[in-house]
Each structure stands twice: as C-alpha cells, then as structure tokens.
Image: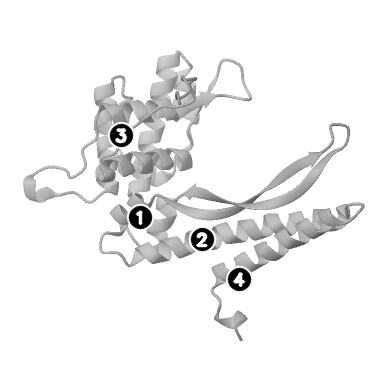
Amino acid sequence: MAEAMKTPLEVARDKFDVALKDANAALEKNPVDMTAYSAAIAALDEAEKQYAKLAAEAKYAEFTTKDNPIVEIIKARTYTILGHKETRGGTKENPRVMSVDMVEKSRDIDLLAFCEKAKLDTNWAFVASRVNQLMCLRAATQLGADVKKIATSYFLRDKVKEINLGKTPTSNTQVCKLLQTVIDEIMPSDMTEGGVAYKVNSHDVAYLDDLYGKKSGKHDLTVRVSNDSFFRRILVDICYRLVTNGKYGVDGYKGYKDEA
C-alpha cells in the first residue's frame, strides 16, 4: 500500500538504493562476486537514467504552474540527478574497488523540453537554429575555412529556412544584434517602456564565442562547433545571467594558494 503512494521519482530512487546496496554486498564477498557486481552496476546505471528522466519531468511540472514560467525555470537553471562513484583501494600490486557511493549531480534544464511540456511557444528554437547556422558560418569565415561548402551542406529544417536574419555576422556588434533577436524570442519583453527587459551586451557575445567551438577530435586543424542542443544551453546560460544580473568568470588557470 505504501509503495502505491510513492511518486515515480521516489520509486526510481528506491531502485537506485537497492542496486547500490547490491553492488556493495557483492564487493564484501571474499572473493568478490564479480557476476553479482556487474549485474548491480548495470541495474544502477539503468536506475540513474530513469531517475534523471523523472527528475526532469518533475522539475518541469513544478515550474509549469509558475506565474512567469520561462523566467522562473531559467532562474532555477538546473535539477538534481543521481550518480555513483567507485572508491578504489587495496595494494599497488592488487588494486580493487572497495565501495560504490552515491553522488548527486546537477544537470542543466532543457528549455525546449520545458516549453513543450508547459505548452509554451517553441518558435524561438527555430530562430535559435538559424542564429546557430550564422554563428557556424562566422566561425568558418574567421578560420578561413570553405564557407561555401559549409553553407550548402549545413542542414536546416524547412521552418528554419524561412527565417531571414541577414548575412553572416562579421563583427561583435552584428553578433550582439543577432543574440538580442533570439533572446527577445525566448524572454518576455517589457514594452511599456518601449524597450526590451533583458538587453545583451558584449560580455554575452564573448561568452558565446568562447563556448561555441572546441578542438575537433576527428579532423586536424578543425574546430567542432555547437550543435543546436548545445547552442540552446549557451542561450539559457546567457538568459540566466540576464535574469540574475550575474557576472561571467574564468577558471582552469593555476593560481596562488591562499596563505594561512
């Protein structure tokens, strides 16, 4: 009876806990029961996937009822999922997994999935896709790549082809205008003052540029640009900065240790 009263998310958590317990029980055997351990890890992976799916659905359902759902879900920005990590020990000659522990992780919201769930306008995603294509062509132009080949082979859905946002942006000012166009599509505007409620700036352009591409793992001297899914994640980050009046930062550099 108690089981029937649990939410799907709670049931998924129970499955995760059982699989975690089974994994550690297998490790405590002497010798370790590797068959049982492998089965428990497989069950753990499956439970994590199910929990992540249900956690997203629960988060989106919660914010669907908010007065200003787009702004509120962007403020939330993430939801919590479950994962696991193996703690290793033993000897140098005979290292082994000593235990498996639960870890909580943050996953970024999928704004398009939320809008679909909340039955909100999703046309902004088509605009975002067109802007992404123009950003790809901008990157190709800056790198001296074969722009014509990329432009003719870049896949666009029919609805996206109908959107005219001008030529490939060659300056930060043009990118800023493009970025403002798609942000206006996503965010509610305050037209009572004759302007937009959320105005992008050069820092947002820099953030977009810095995250847009990375080194390709398949081809030499090639930059891998963002696909539509990742591009939308960058846009959510920018929206988050706008609604929270946040500030960008950098890390990964080596700094001085704090003195005691």
Q: Nearer the viewer, residue 114 or 248?
A: 248
Q: Kindly identify which numbered label has been placed on residue 55.
A: 2
Q: Residue 240 got which mark?
A: none
Location of mark 3 (residue): 247
Q: Is residue 216 visible?
A: yes
Binning the other alpha carbons within 10 Å of mark 4 as few (below 14), some (14 to 19) or many (20 upward) gives: some
Cβ atoms at labels 1 and 3 below 8 Å apart: no
Location of the C terminus by quadrant is: top left
Residue holding disc 4: 11
Circle 1: is it few (<14), some (14-19), or many (20+) Cα within 10 Å? many
Q: Amino acid at mark 1?
A: Ile
Circle nearer the N terminus (1, 2): 2
Query: How crowded is the residue under tag 3: few (<14 C-alpha within 10 Å), some, or many (20+)?
Result: few
Q: Disc count in the image?
A: 4
Q: Which residue is mark 1?
A: 73
* Dot 4 amino acid type: Val
Circle 2 packing at 10 Å, graded few (<14), some (14-19), many (20+), is many
N-terminal of the pair, mark 2 or mark 3, is 2
Outermost residue on the right side: it is: 31
- Asked if marks 3 and 4 touch (Cβ < 8 Å), the reply is no
Marks 1/3: CA–CA distance: 19 Å
